[in-house]
Image (spheres, rainbow, N blue to C red):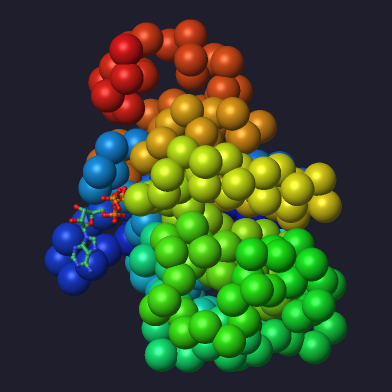
């Protein structure tokens, strides 16, 4: 479904991604791990068109989308839940959702609220009044309303209490059961390993490990060097 081939990306003169290659198959949950500054967020931005690659290909369903504008890429079925969540704090929950709603999407306002009952009771509240967990749910709900087939999640567990992290994990599992493909960036390696079918570890903008979660757990060298575990 998604294949990055030898992607190089820059911020100005800063060369961040160096020949990065990875893939996500249909219905698969793929985790992208690595230390701070390894280039995880930049990888997601190179897929969504926010930081277009200078070299390499971003193949989505076989067509190269590298260099297309972000809104065009969204319309093709790729949605991102950013690390910063980007909720409009002065708009209500309902307004935040309504902005994203798109005709033809498998998800609409009613089905999303059924899935996120916590948001239903908060519809009239301003985005800025929500807890971190509610904001994450709102960010995921909003992404679903655009009708994605591929969801990019940037550190969904960030700043959340363990119980709320479990709720986010349940949501990811449920979306997986509905065949939404996901690329999951996480600092919380344990969470990611529980959810993922396959894992990439990147460092300095290049892949240093690819394999199944069990293979990564067994590799003390990689976990100690790149994940600060062990
Ligand atoms: P984190 O967990 O800290 O978000 P990350 O793996 O997602 O880490 P990126 O955000 O992709 O890392 O950042 C990769 C590198 O690019 C870092 O060295 C960072 O300082 C740099 N960088 C990120 N954003 C910008 C920017 N807007 N301008 C210049 N450099 C940037």
Q: Residue at 84% across / 83% down in the picture?
A: 104
Quarter of the image that includes the C terminus: top left
Q: Residue at 71% across / 65% down in the picture?
A: 117
- Judging depth in this view, the residue of 98 and 187 nearest the camera is 98
- Judging depth in this view, the residue of 159 and 201 nearest the camera is 159
* Quadrant of the rendered image containing residue 207: top left
Q: Residue at 54% across / 15% down in the picture?
A: 215
Question: Is 176 situated above or below 223?
Answer: below
Position of 42 with respect to 130 (left or right) is left
- Percent x, y for residue 79? 60, 69
Question: Is 167 situated above or below 12?
Answer: above
Ligand 1's image quarter is bottom left
* Quadrant of the rendered image containing residue 88: bottom left
Give the residue furthest to the left: 13
- Percent x, y for residue 141? 64, 69
Position of 8 with respect to 72 (left or right) is left
Quarter of the image that includes the N terminus: bottom right
- Percent x, y for residue 33? 41, 37
Q: Residue at 26% across / 63% down in the picture?
A: 10
The total of numbered circles placed on residues is: 0
- Percent x, y for residue 35? 28, 37
- Judging depth in this view, the residue of 166 and 34 nearest the camera is 166
Question: Is 171 situated above or below 61?
Answer: above
* Quadrant of the rendered image containing residue 85: bottom left
Visible residue check, residue 45: no
Visible residue check, residue 94: yes
Position of 228 with respect to 53 (left or right) is left
Give the residue furthest to the front: 121
């Amino acid at each position: 479904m998604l294949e990055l081939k030898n992607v190089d990306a820059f911020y100005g003169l800063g060369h961040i991604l160096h020949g990065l290659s990875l893939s996500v198959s249909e219905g698969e949950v793929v985790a992208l791990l690595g230390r701070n500054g390894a280039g995880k967020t930049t990888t997601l931005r190179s897929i969504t068109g926010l930081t277009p690659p200078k070299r390499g290909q971003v193949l989505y369903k076989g067509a190269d989308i590298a260099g297309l504008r972000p809104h065009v890429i969204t319309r093709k079925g790729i949605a991102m839940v950013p690390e910063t969540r980007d909720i409009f704090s002065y708009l209500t929950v309902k307004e935040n959702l309504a902005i994203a709603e798109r005709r033809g999407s498998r998800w609409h306002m009613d089905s999303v609220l059924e899935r996120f009952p916590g948001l239903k009771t908060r519809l009239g509240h301003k985005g800025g009044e929500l807890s971190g967990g509610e904001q994450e749910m709102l960010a995921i709900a909003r992404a679903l309303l655009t009708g994605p087939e591929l969801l990019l999640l940037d550190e969904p567990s960030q700043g959340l209490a363990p119980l709320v992290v479990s709720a986010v994990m349940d949501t990811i599992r449920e979306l997986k059961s509905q065949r939404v493909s996901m690329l999951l960036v996480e600092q919380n390696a344990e969470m990611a390993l529980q959810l993922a079918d396959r894992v990439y570890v990147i460092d300095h903008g290049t892949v240093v490990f690819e394999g199944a979660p069990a293979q990564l757990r067994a590799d003390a060298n990689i976990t100690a060097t790149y994940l600060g575990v062990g």
